Image (cartoon, rainbow, N blue to C red):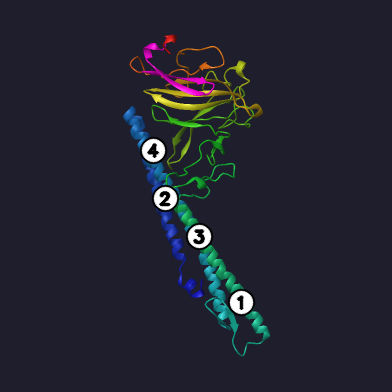
Amino acid sequence: MSISVIRAQNPQEVVYAGGDLATKASALDELVGEQVRALNQLKQDWSGSAANAAVAAAYRNIQHQHWQHEKLAALANAMKSGGGTLVAVRDVLLAWVDIASTLFDVSDAGVVTPRPPNDTAPWVAIAASYTKIIQQLIESFVTTDQTVSTGISAINAGWLPGNNPLPGNIDPDSLNSEQLKWMQSLAGSGYPDTGEGGVGVPNTDLSIMGMTPDGRLFTIQGDTGVGMGETGGPGPRPAEGGHNNIIFWRMDEHGKWVVDEVVNDPFPNTPGRLPKQAEDISTIPTSTFNNGDTMYTSVMNVKNWDDGTWQTRSSQLYKSTDGVTWSPPQLVTAQPGAYGVFQSPLSGGDSIDASISLWKPYGTHLVQIQNSDTRGLGAY
């Protein structure tokens, strides 16, 4: 890049444009807040399946706007910061060129040469020093320009700087594509007070997400068991358990999900609730679904991962109407021995078929039977 090209540029306009984007980002943030407040009022005044569908659609729309706000804010910061650096480098470069031009000839490439009669050896050495400084400043301007351009392009592609989970060495930006956008951390080590990088729930590689019949978003954490860190989060793990927890989330007025309520050890027959099964170290959620006003969740209890193995004690299905108090549905059947039925059914009433899952040595099988036959063990 030549001196004349740099002189013709006005990076201060980049700074001004960044300021305009920051204003637009702030306005969008206010709009998101208005929508969240309106949505909260709607949830108080309207309930039922239609209301839940409307709330879910609104959440998706607000989340999209939140992501757009984060993108605009990141672009604004990149343009103001990068543009400011370009302004500073350009000003210094042109100042050096102007000073050198009073005594020497300065080419567009930044090469400084002496003018007669000041062309003796000392003047040649001074000119060489000017050349080195000016060309370094040209290179610095070019490098800064490329860095700013690369950063803006990355943000436009959805790679938001600083929006990474904790601890480090995990870069969700590498996952971004036209189909996938990184939003925020939910469970994860992080900081419970701010939610940055997660909310203080480590080792949650087997968590699942769902929504209650009344429209509350929740996550059920897996792998928060014994020997997996000092906290089960958010906050300290209770002494009597902490092998599992449910976190309910609410959307704040910026469109970000924050912790609303935590239920520790919600499932009755899991390690943290039954001392006689204290040898189990973790409870892992495997599915969750709603049927009318009732929530269902299946979990499995892990005994150990000793010697490269993965040993489980059982798998159970639980139901709840509020997401806080859980109980197992009526057991259909049990079979002695190492293999057999260990999952209770999903049943919607006498007019709806029931399903049960059976664990076999070579896999898990789903079986469907008539609801009226669930008490007849010979029917399946």
Which residue carries the number 4 mark?
Answer: 59
Q: Gap between marks 2 and 1, in whole Å?
A: 45 Å
Residue name at image x 53 percent, y 48 percent? 162
**Of callouts 2 and 4, the N-terminal one:** 2
Query: Which sits earlier in the primary sequence, circle 2 or circle 1?
Result: 2
How far apart are the alpha carbons under marks 2 and 4?
20 Å
The span picked out in magenta is 353-375
Q: Which mark is residue 148?
A: 3
Mark yes or no: residue 89 visible: yes
Based on the picture, tell me whether residue 155 belongs to the magenta stretch.
no
Q: What element does badge 2 sit on? A: helix
Q: Amino acid at mark 1?
A: Tyr
Say the numbered circle drawn on residue 130.
1
**Going by the image, does 30 lie left or right of 359?**
left
Q: Quadrant of residue 143?
A: bottom right
Position of 306 compared to 109: left or right? right
- Name the quarter where the C terminus is drawn: top left
Residue corresponding to mark 2: 26
Tags 2 and 4 in contact by the CB under 8 Å rule? no
Report helix, strand or loop for mark 3: helix
Alpha carbon distance from label 4 to label 1: 60 Å
